[in-house]
Amino acid sequence: MQESSTIKHSNSGRSRNFIEESIEEDIREGKNKGRVHTRFPPEPNGYLHIGHAKSICLNFGLGAKYKGLTNLRFDDTNPVKEELEYVDSIMEDVRWLGYDWGDRLYYASDYFEQLYEYAVILIKKGKAFVCDMQADEISATRGTPKRPGKESPYRNRSVAENLDLFERMRAGEFPDGARVLRARIDMASPNMHMRDPILYRIIHAAHHRTGDTWCIYPMYDFAHGQSDSIERITHSICTLEFEVHRPLYDWLIREIEIYAPRQIEFARLNLSYTVMSKRKLLKLVQEGHVNGWDDPRMPTISGLRRRGYTPDSIRNFAELIGVAKRDNVIDVSMLEFCIREDLNKRANRIMGVLNPLRVVIDNFPEGVVEEMEAVNNPEDPDAGTRRVPFSREILIEREDFMEDPPDKFFRLAPGREVRLRSAYIVRCESIEREPVTNIVTTIHCTYDPTTRSGMPNSNRKVKGTLHWVSAPHALESEIRLYNRLFRVPDPDDTEEGKSFKDYLNPDSLRVVTGYLEPAILTAKPGEKFQFERVGYFCVDKDSSGTNLVFNRVVPLKDSWTKAGG
Ligand code: ATP
Ligand code: MG
């Protein structure tokens, strides 16, 4: 019965992944009365990136697929690193991706009182104790995976003393780091996370939501599982590194005796030529290697949005890569494939020349302007047509001309013919050059007036078709050509003595002037176009009035070295 409703929701007809199998198994067994409730739990300490997008699509996707619910919960347990700016950007990004948490917006900080009570329960059961050791002492006595750790000398404090000290920690009697609350589990456990982990620490810092109410804050490991439990999350989808934390989460839930969500781990998304850790992304921003979190070279959702990625392309990407149980690296070209595929359907075409060469059509009358009709999007019949001015002097791409071309060069060369897209067939008659440098400055052509649309020879075939713009009508725009931010596939895998920053690509941004069809003038920030034969471009927010600025989303083909690259 559940099966038939799920199939309709699955957009690619693919087989079920292991997470869906687990959920369907729970539904079949009547666990949680068939209820499915997931959550996306970001820590508001940075902007979301494409890896988070994967998790968002997964969690909200599962909620929708099983007619369940999905919460947005900020895991805001560390007042030192968290900020309102991040909270706002995260909400904006989730919404932009197309997901809706309805009235289910939560904060772990809303549960501080409840979490405190849970800690008291553990203390009363003799399962937690206040430890006076310093953080470095605690880590020094944790042992190694092969060697057991050393028990804290404070481990056998009485319940009464622990309760008193924990209350005084809360009351602000002790400075930062003076004491912590630790679980009392097993210092010899082969799982390091079970070796009396820290549950609470003292931080005298204002929290962005609770202000100065608290000076003790729960560790992520103490807050996360319990928050899921409080919200009665049925399936806590986590990334793989939390698999080793699971025994601790289970232990806490069991000892506190509260509702137990089912945790399922999947491999985090890694992308080639990309770093994804928030800590590293923050460094790039703070040290000015990029221009902010939404720099179009960043793998952040805000960066991808500004670059010109669409929500659909990112959701399709998440679906295409699926979920894995083992860590792997996805080739960034997969993401580029998804945006090309999406923009091919939705972006209108225009002509734009990025590296201009002047062409004079000698037999075309001076001062005359003809209007050519051009199809906006061959993939979308509803997109209509537009008018493109044609005149005696046009610009073409310098790469589209060769003086001494090989046989297979089907573009312009002395004596050869090409079609100008949506216009005439022209033939190259002669070349003008700069006398000192010998650089070609102008090409002289003749046109065949019978070859435009509606004329008898409009269908005459020539091998090459070039894009062009009428020189007197061209709109000059700033074009930002992005390339990969890193020059190696795995910038995280650093050699000794090197940092990921040593692998930054010095050519990740090149700014050129583009000469565009005047039709572009009405374009608004965020609007996307295919510059024919060149690539996909998005109007940047830095545009103002007729000063348009474009970000290159991706070149047309999967090659970063060709024209304009
Ligand atoms: P980072 O390691 O970059 O700081 P994080 O995992 O600490 O990221 P959170 O805010 O805790 O950041 O992440 C929120 C959710 O997004 C978590 O459930 C986490 O599992 C998931 N997530 C984070 N990075 C990825 C990724 N690369 N692929 C898939 N899911 C991810
Ligand atoms: Mg995390």
Image (cartoon, rainbow, N blue to C red):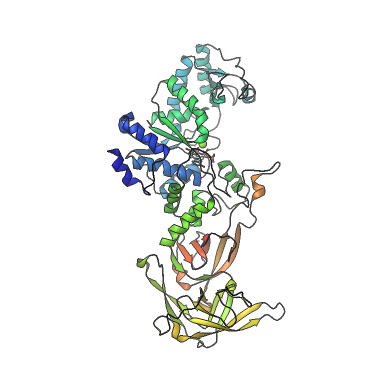
Residue 522, horizontal then vertical, whole percent? 44, 68
Q: Is residue 235 left or right of residue 291?
A: left
The answer to whether one can see residue 48 in this image is no
Q: Is residue 404 left or right of residue 344?
A: right
Location of the C terminus by quadrant is: bottom right
Q: Nearer the viewer, residue 546 or 385?
A: 385
Q: Nearer the viewer, residue 2 or 397?
A: 2
The answer to whether one can see residue 354 in this image is yes
Which of the 4 image quadrants contains residue 118? top left
Q: Is residue 161 left or right of residue 437?
A: left
Residue 329, horizontal then vertical, whole percent? 54, 45
Total labels drawn: 0
Q: Is residue 61 above or below residue 406?
A: above
User: What residue is shown at x 64% (from left), y 45% (from top)?
Assistant: 500
Location of the N terminus by quadrant is: top left
Q: Is residue 404 above or below residue 316?
A: below
Residue 288, horizontal then vertical, whole percent? 62, 50
In this view, which residue lies farthest toward the front? 407
In this view, which residue lies farthest toward the right? 436
